[in-house]
Amino acid sequence: MNTSVLEPDPMLAARDIRKSYGRGAARFDALAGVSLEVQAGESIAIVGKSGSGKSTLMHLLALLDRPDDGSVLVGAADASQLPVRQLNRLRNEEFGFVFQQFFLTPNATVLENVVLPLKIAGVGASERKTRGMAVLEQLDMADKARNRAVTLSGGQKQRVVIARALINNPRVIFADEPTGNLDTISGALVEDILFTLNREQGIALVIVTHDPDLAARCDRQFFMRDGRAVGSLEVHGVSA
Amino acid sequence: MNLLDITRAAVGNTFRSKTRTTLTVLAIFIGAFTLTITSAVGSGVSDYIANQIGVFGARDVLTITKTAEDAAAETEGLSPYDPDKAANGRDALSHVEAPHITPDDLDVIRQVDGVLDVSQVQHVSPRYVEYGENGKFELHVNVDGVLFNPDLASGWQLDGGTTEGQILLVSPYVDGLGFSDAEAAVGEVVTMGVADYTGEIHEVQATVAGVMHETILASGAAVNDTLADELYHLQSIGGPTEASDHSVHARVRFDASWSEEQVALLQTDLTDLGYDATTVADRIGVIQAVVSGIIGVLNAFAIIALLAAGFGIVNTLLMSVQERTREIGLMKAMGMGGGRIYTLFSMEAVIIGFLGSVIGAVVAIGVGAVANDLIKGTVLADLEGLEVLRFEFAPVATIILLVMGIAFLAGTLPARRAARQNPIDALRYE
C-alpha cells in the first residue's frame, strides 16, 4: 500500500517488532512481529487480554525498552540509532505516562509529585511551582496541592498522575489501564479528561485497556492476542 | 535534575527510613570517633614531644658513646671474661655495661673534622637539696638537661658561661623547698649536699636560675657546667683517678648552622672511629617512632571499623534500592538518566558517611576535651603542658573526607544497581 505517501510521517511507528522474555523452555514471546503507527493527535486503544503483549507494545512505543528485532521509529529516525540522552529527553518532554497503579510518591505532596518531570529536566524551583500549580488548576486539583499524595482518593490520584503527565505539554500520553483501579464514576471522569486533552490540545493518546467501552471512545482500536495483531477497527467519528 | 535537587532529594531519602539510617550512621560514627580520638592522641603526644623538647633541643650537640665491639656476641650465649675490659671494682662506673670514654678517646674525637669541642658528660648525684631551714630533699640531676632549653615556668635558661653555679629546678620542688611560687624561687640560693668517696658530705651553693615544667625526657633538675664540674669534683674526692676521668657519654659541639647532611657526615665519621653519635633529634626520633607505631596500630583498628561500617552502607543502600525499585523505574521512565540515578544513590551514601563522620568527630572532640581535663588533673598531672588529645582542623577534616570517600565507594555497588535498572522491570515490580 502506498497510502503513506499521502499521509504525513507518523509520529511513532513500530515496524515488525519482536520481544521475548526468558530463555530456553521458559522463553515467552511477548511480541511476535507487530507493526503499528501512531499519528499526531489521534487516539489509539490497544486492546487485548492479559498476556496478549499489549503492555509490551506500549512500552516499546514509549521507548522504555528496546525490541529484540524490528524497529521503532520516532518521526523519521530509528530509535535504536538515537543516543540514550536524547531518548531520555524525548520521554521527559514529549511523552506523558499514566499508570494503573499511579506510581505517586506517597509521602510527597501533590505538587511535588506533579513537578517530578520538571525536576528531572532540571527546571528551577520557582518555575516548577508556577507550572505545577497551573496544571493542577487545569485539573481542578489546585486546592490539594499541599496534601500528601497518600491522602487522596483513587480518582484524585489519577488526576494528579494526569497532571504529572501533562506538565511538559507532551505530544502523546501513554496510558496503561488508566481506569483499571477506579470506580465507574471516577473512571468516567478520568476518561473525559483524557479525551478532552486529546480533542482540545491535540495530544495523542495510546491507551492500553481491556475495557471495550473505553476502547470504543478512541479513534482506532488495535486488537492483540498472543503477541500478534489480530485486527483493527477505525472509527471515523467527528474528531477524525 | 540539577545537583541541588539531587542533593535535596538524597537528604530527603536518607531520612525516609530513620531506624536503618540511624543504625548505619552509628556504625560509621564508631569508626570515625575512634579514628578522630587516635589521631588526636597521635598529634597530641608527638606535638608534645616536638614542642616541649624538640623545639628546645640543642641543635649543635652530638652525644657520644663508645660502640660495644662485642655487641653481637652478647646476644648469643655467655660472654667470656676479659680482665682488660672488666671495670675496676671501685670504679664509679662499674655498674655501667657500656665501654668507657677515656681522655684518649676525647683526643681522637677532637681531631675529627667539624668537631668544635668535646667534653665528657659526668654523672653527678647530689644527696640532697635544701633552701633555708625548710628541710632536705632528695634531688635527681639530669645531665642531659643542658641538651634542652626546657619549657620554663619562670626565670631564665642556664648560663653556660658564668662562674656562678646555677640550677634549674623542676616545678614540684617549688612547694617542697618552701618557695611561695615559681617566681619567688628565681635568684634564690639553695644548698646542695654531695658525698665524696669516703662518705663525707660537702655542701655547695647554687643559684636558682629558673623553674621548669617537668617533661618526659628531662625529668630531673638541670645544672650548668660550672655547678656540674664543682659537684663532680667533690664526689670524686678520695676515688681512683680512673673514676674521675672516665665517662660513659661525651658531648660534641659542632656548628649550629650545619645542614642535616653535614651533621650526618660527621656522625658517619665518628661511627667509623668506633663511636655512636646521636643528635638530640635522633634521640627524640626514637620516642616519636614508638609513639607513631602505637598510633598507627590504633588507627588501623579504626580503619577496620570504618571498613566494616562501609559494608553497612552497602547493605542499607541495597535495601533502599530494592524498596524504591518502582520509584527508580518511574524516574527512568520520565527521562532521568542512569548517571543521575547513580549520583542520587552515591550522594545518599556520602550523606550517611558525612553524618557519621561529623557526629563522630564532634563527639570525639567533646569527649577529648573532658578527657584532657581529667588526665591533666590526675594521671599525668606531672607532665605540664601536655595535651594528650590534640584536635587540629586538618586531620579532623581529612578523617571526615576519608569517611565520605569510603562511604562513596560503598555506595557504588548499590548505585550501579539502581542506575542499571530497566524501567519496565522496575515498574512491573510488586
Image (cartoon, helix red, strand yellow):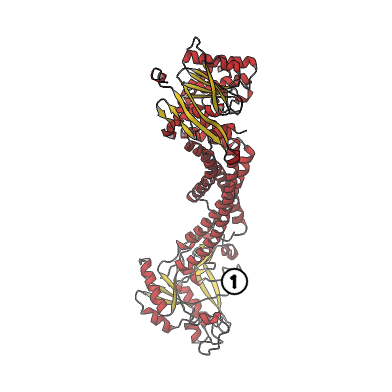
Quickly name the residue at label 1. Answer: B138
| Residue B169 percent across, percent down from the top left | 53, 66
Q: How would you rate the neighbour count of disc 1 (Cα within 10 Å): few for under 14, some for 14-19, many for 20 or more?
A: few
Q: Nearer the viewer, residue A103 or B382?
A: A103
Q: Nearer the viewer, residue B5 or B216?
A: B5
- Asked if B174 appears above or below A193 in the picture, the reply is below
Left or right of residue A55: residue B245: left
Snapshot quadrant of residue B270: bottom left
- Give the quarter of the image for residue B136: bottom right
Q: Position of residue A15 (x, y in %)?
A: 46, 28
Camera-side residue: B81 or B356? B356
Q: Residue at x 64, y 15 (%)?
A: A184
**The residue tagged with tag 1: helix, strand or loop?**
loop
- x, y percentage for residue B184? 53, 60
Looking at the picture, does residue A112 appear above or below residue B142?
above
- Can you say whether A187 is above or below B183 in the image? above
How many numbered marks, from 0 up? 1
Where's the N terminus of chain A, which quadrant?
top left
Where is residue B93? Give x, y as percent. 53, 81
Which amino acid type is marked by label 1? Glu
Q: Is residue B368 visible to us here?
A: no
Q: Is residue B79 visible to us here?
A: yes
Farthest-out residue, front: A1
